Image (tube, grey):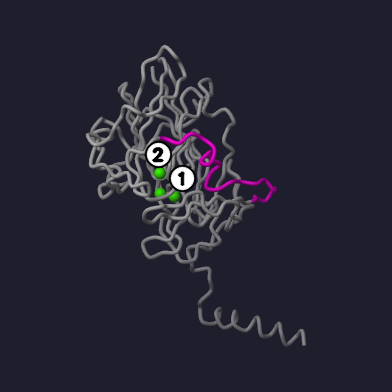
Amino acid sequence: MATKRIATVTLPSLILIAAGCSPSSDITQSSSSISDYHGSASITQGRATTIEPNLFECKNGRSRVAGVGEIADSEGKIWTVPAKNHFTTATKAVDLYEECANITPQGLADVDETNIPTAVIDEDAEVITGYIFADNYFELYINGKLIATDTVPFTPFNASIVKFKVNKPYTIAVKVVDWEENLGLGTENNRGKGFHPGDGGFIASFSDGTVTGQDWQAQTYYTSPIYDLSCLSEIDGKRLSESCTTEGTDAGEDAYAAHWETPSTWMKQNFDSTSWPQATLYSEDEIGVKNKKAYMNFIEKFSGAGASFIWSTNVVLDNEVLLRYQVK
Ligand SMILES: [Ca+2]
Ligand SMILES: [Ca+2]
Ligand SMILES: [Ca+2]
């Protein structure tokens, strides 16, 4: 009886191989295994276990499911994807534009900026106002203190306003996350593909003249999907994936992901980020914001204020990025 069952199972694969349909022609088939990888990342493969099905319900309109997952690497270490976050516990930023909450002003003239709560770091300091747009999610720290998180972790695209009192010099640190539907796989259902790698992007300006730009630092801590680990490289602190494919696929369940442990003090003023790369700049067209009212209605506070979209070296594959900037 056992013999009979084995014969039934193996027959289809024999037919596939005979017909030249071996899965090795698929881009999801890697040419290098985890044991061949010698970089500084920890590698996982496949889908994470969902630990939070959805952080956000859109009360008005549609949003992508913003779940959180966990996945173990080959040494048993557990990684949280797309990123550990404080969405459910921290103070939220005030919405400039947020469709799910029916906050859809045409521009700043329609926004009451007087009643924004002010986070106090230094009592005697001036109030600084910040305008923020993230694809998809941000957590903002000033001098190591968590000031606010984004109100929408994934979609729809929204924009935020924050106020804080701090004396110069001060340190801005931001965790930004390109969220994902397929947890651990770095992908979402988009553009006709079940496993399309989404992209990130972050832009902000502050009333003291501070803007996002090339003089910020940006380091990735989670890069996926990776279908061939030999495309990953590291040079001078840069965690590079420029030769990895950014194509979508309908067969992305076996994707690899590269994880690096976030330092516990990465947001503190005295954290040594000298090994981090400078931020990479991206255009509005590359981020795809020209059809997004959450961005365009406040463009005077974004590119109009001299700010640039920033991210780490790969705005598609790097999904959890830490940013730092010192205001002098
Ligand atoms: Ca958001
Ligand atoms: Ca991505
Ligand atoms: Ca995205």
Question: In the rendering, at what x and y percent does residue 94 appear?
Answer: 39, 35
State the extent of the magenta-drawn residues as a range.
72-93
Residue 4: in magenta span = no
Q: Is residue 128 left or right of residue 226?
A: left
Res 311 label: 2
Please give the name of the residue rendered at 38% of the width and 17% of the height, measured from the top-left corner. 328
- Give SS at disc 1: strand
Disc 1 crowd rating (10 Å Cα; few below 14, some 14-19, many 20+) is many
- Give SS at disc 2: strand
Front residue of 110/238: it is 110
Q: Is residue 139 left or right of residue 258?
A: left
Front residue of 155/318: it is 155
Please give the name of the residue rendered at 50% of the width and 62% of the height, measured from the top-left corner. 252
Question: In the rendering, at what x and y percent does residue 22 appear?
Answer: 53, 74
| 281 over 199 or under it: above or below | above
Does ligand 2 reach within 8 Å of label 1's beta carbon? Answer: yes
Among the 4 quarters of the image, the one containing residue 93: top left
Res 318 label: 1
Please give the name of the residue rendered at 33% of the width and 24% of the height, measured from the top-left corner. 210
Residue 89: in magenta span = yes
| 119 over 308 or under it: above or below | above
Between the C-alphas of marks 1 and 2, the distance is 8 Å
Is the residue under label 2 in contact with that under label 1 (CB below 8 Å)? Answer: yes
**Main SS, magenta residues:** loop
